[in-house]
Image (cartoon, grey):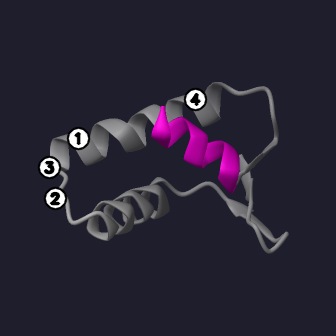
């Protein structure tokens, strides 16, 4: 699965980058997120991305999955 970034570039899906983005977002709202929850959210994103029929997914689509 490829991820299309806002810049238009694409790169391989990387669950670690999802985790980093979630951590940064939680820091932005001054809220700690437990590791088990971080892993659960990242796994949900990975599962939905993997089960998608798309070959490429946008970062905004990934954000929507996280926010769900």
Q: Which residues are magenta?
A: 59-68
Distance CA(mark 1)–CA(mark 2):
10 Å
Compared with 27, 14 (above or below) is: above
Mark 2 or 3: the one toward you: 2
Q: Earlier in the sequence, mark 1 or mark 2?
A: 2
Residue at the spot of label 4: 48
Label 1 Cα crowd, 10 Å radius (few <14 / some 14-19 / many 20+): few
Distance CA(mark 4)–CA(mark 3):
22 Å
User: SS at mark 3?
Assistant: loop
User: SS at mark 4?
Assistant: helix
Give percent across and percent down for residue 14.
54, 57
Q: Which mark is residue 25?
A: none
Give percent across and percent down for residue 50.
62, 33
Mark 2 or 4: the one toward you: 2
Q: Earlier in the sequence, mark 1 or mark 4?
A: 1
Give the residue drawn at x 73%, y 65%.
Answer: 5
**Chief secondary structure of the magenta span?**
helix
Give the residue drawn at x 48%, y 41%.
Answer: 66
Give the residue drawn at x 27%, y 68%.
Answer: 27
User: SS at mark 1?
Assistant: helix
Q: Earlier in the sequence, mark 4 or mark 3?
A: 3
Contact (Cβ within 8 Å) of mark 2 with mark 3: yes
Q: Nearer the viewer, residue 55 or 41?
A: 41
Label 3 Cα crowd, 10 Å radius (few <14 / some 14-19 / many 20+): few
Contact (Cβ within 8 Å) of mark 3 with mark 1: yes
Residue at the spot of label 2: 32
Residue at the spot of label 1: 37
Mark 1 or 4: the one toward you: 1
Residue 65 lies within the magenta run: yes
Distance CA(mark 2)–CA(mark 3):
7 Å
């Amino acid at each position: 699965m490829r991820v299309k970034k806002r810049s238009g570039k694409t790169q391989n899906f990387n669950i670690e980058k999802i985790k980093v983005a979630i951590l940064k977002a939680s820091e932005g709202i001054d809220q700690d997120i437990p590791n088990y929850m971080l892993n659960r959210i990242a796994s949900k994103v990975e599962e939905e991305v993997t089960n998608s029929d798309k070959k490429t997914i946008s970062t905004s689509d990934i954000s929507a999955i996280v926010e769900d």
